[in-house]
Structures are given as C-alpha cells and as structure tokens.
Amino acid sequence: MIQVIFCSRHLYNEKNEIDVSLELPTDTETVKRYMETAGIKDKNDLLISDYTIHELYAGSCGEYQNWVGADLNELNYLAERLEKMFNEDMFEEYCALLRMYQPQNTADMINLSYGFDKVSYDPEIKNNQKLGEYVVKNNLFEVSEDMKSFVDYNKVGELYLDTMKHSEDAGVMQVNEDGCICDMHKGQERYAYYDGMNIPDEYMILTEATFENEEPPQQDIQN
C-alpha cells in the first residue's frame, strides 16, 4: 500500500548512503533487517527520502509528496488502514472522502479511514439535478405528488446542498462528477479517531528495541 525509501542520516552526510525500499504494512522483524542493511544506528539516524502511496489512493489525496515529517510508524498505521479499505471494498467511499477533504497530512488520511457508519456515497449522483431527483424520490424534500412533474430538480438539489451547508445538525456533502459523498461527522468529530501522536501498539514497527543487539544465549561451562 505504501512504498518507503530511506537511508542512514550519518551515511548520507558522508555521501556513502545505502538506499533501501520497504513496502508497508510490515512487521518489526522485517524493519530490523532493513535497518541493518541501510546501516542505521538508531531512530534519529533514520532518513526517509521518499514514499509512494498506492495508485488506487494517490490520485485522490492531493499533493501528499509535499507533506512534511513522514514517520515510519505512522506510515505503517496508514498502510494498514489503506489495506483494510481495499479488503473490505470501501476504497471508493474512502477516495471520495479524500477528494472532498483534501487531507493535509498522514494523520488526516488515517482519520478519514474511520467512521464509515456515518458516510454515504452514490457515484451516480453527479450533479444537482440528480441530487434533486434523489431527495424528492426518497422524501427528503417535501413535494406534493401532484406537483412532482413541475419540479425543478436542479433547483431542489441546489437548495438541499445549501440547507446541508448551513445546518448545525448536518455534516458535509459534496456533489461533482465523481458522485455524491455525505459525511455526517460534525465539526472535529471527523478528526477524533487519531490524535496524530499516540499510535496504537499494533502498528508500531520502529522502536528503540529495534536497535538493541540480541545477546547470544549463555552456554553452560563444562568442568
């Protein structure tokens, strides 16, 4: 889901670095081997030079290459979430959220991967006309039966979007050529799943223990 290229900072400064490419998500043992290959001494010696998000998502998440401060553990967390979206066939809804919110960092992308019980997406509703037809058909906008043939559905869709925009109880809705995405999270609810600092333990692949040398097993001394 994410390809990361990194090297040793001190070797880079000496112009003698070894670039390695690691695919995320992964596990701690794999990371340890890659760190040894790159000659990385500790966490501060890690220099991430580039990372690439899977093409399935890359086109929807804006200029992610310009994001500052990529963290290997956080990227692994994101990669796990991206893989989950793919395995559960939620990637279309997720990509629609990415296009609507235009995430500014890895933490935003992680937060957008949660809370799909409050998200609805219809790829067929591509304009106000289609939205108007949908809300009238589903009785989300009151129109008497004898007046439906006279309804300006484009105007209804426009009014419905405007109502959503100004309602404190509504979430966020966007309609464009990619379809209609509606997120019922209110305010900062959308970004409350992950605080950008406390990565759950199951996604942690790089810690101080990664660089601890394993002591060889002690052998009994035979007299």
Image (spheres, rainbow, N blue to C red):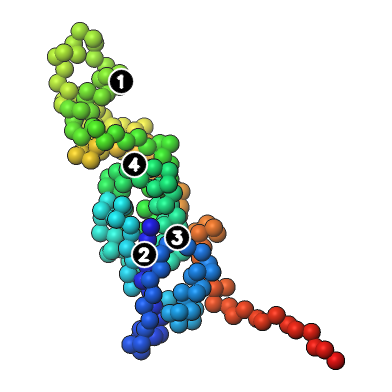
User: Disc 2 vs disc 4: which is toward the camera?
Assistant: 2
Distance from disc 1 to disc 3, alpha carbons, whole Å, reads 42 Å
Above/below status of 2 relative to 30: above
Above/below status of 175 relative to 83: above
Judge from the rendering whether residue 84 lies leftward or rightward of residue 58; answer left or right: right
Residue hosting label 3:
25
User: Dot 2 surroundings within 10 Å: few (below 14), some, or many (20 or more)?
Assistant: some
Q: Of callouts 4 and 3, which one flags the residue occurring earlier in the amino acid sequence?
A: 3
User: Looking at the image, do the residues carrying marks 4 and 3 touch, with CB atoms under 8 Å apart?
Assistant: no
- SS category of the residue bearing label 4: helix
- SS category of the residue bearing label 1: loop
Q: Amino acid at mark 1?
A: Asn
Residue 112 in the image: x percent, y percent?
A: 38, 48
Q: Amino acid at mark 4?
A: Glu
Instruction: Tell me, for residue 93, which label it has, or none.
Output: 4
Distance from disc 2 to disc 1, alpha carbons, whole Å, reads 44 Å
Residue 137 in the image: x percent, y percent?
A: 27, 19
Distance from disc 4 to disc 3, alpha carbons, whole Å, reads 21 Å
User: Disc 1 vs disc 4: which is toward the camera?
Assistant: 4
Residue hosting label 2:
3
Instruction: Tell me, for residue 149, which label it has, or none.
Output: none
Residue hosting label 1:
138
User: Disc 4 vs disc 3: which is toward the camera?
Assistant: 3
User: Looking at the image, do the residues carrying marks 2 and 4 touch, with CB atoms under 8 Å apart?
Assistant: no
Residue at horizontal 32 percent and vertical 36 percent from the top:
121
Question: Observer-nearest residue: 193 or 40?
Answer: 40
User: Looking at the image, do the residues carrying marks 1 and 4 touch, with CB atoms under 8 Å apart?
Assistant: no
Q: Of callouts 1 and 3, which one flags the residue occurring earlier in the amino acid sequence?
A: 3
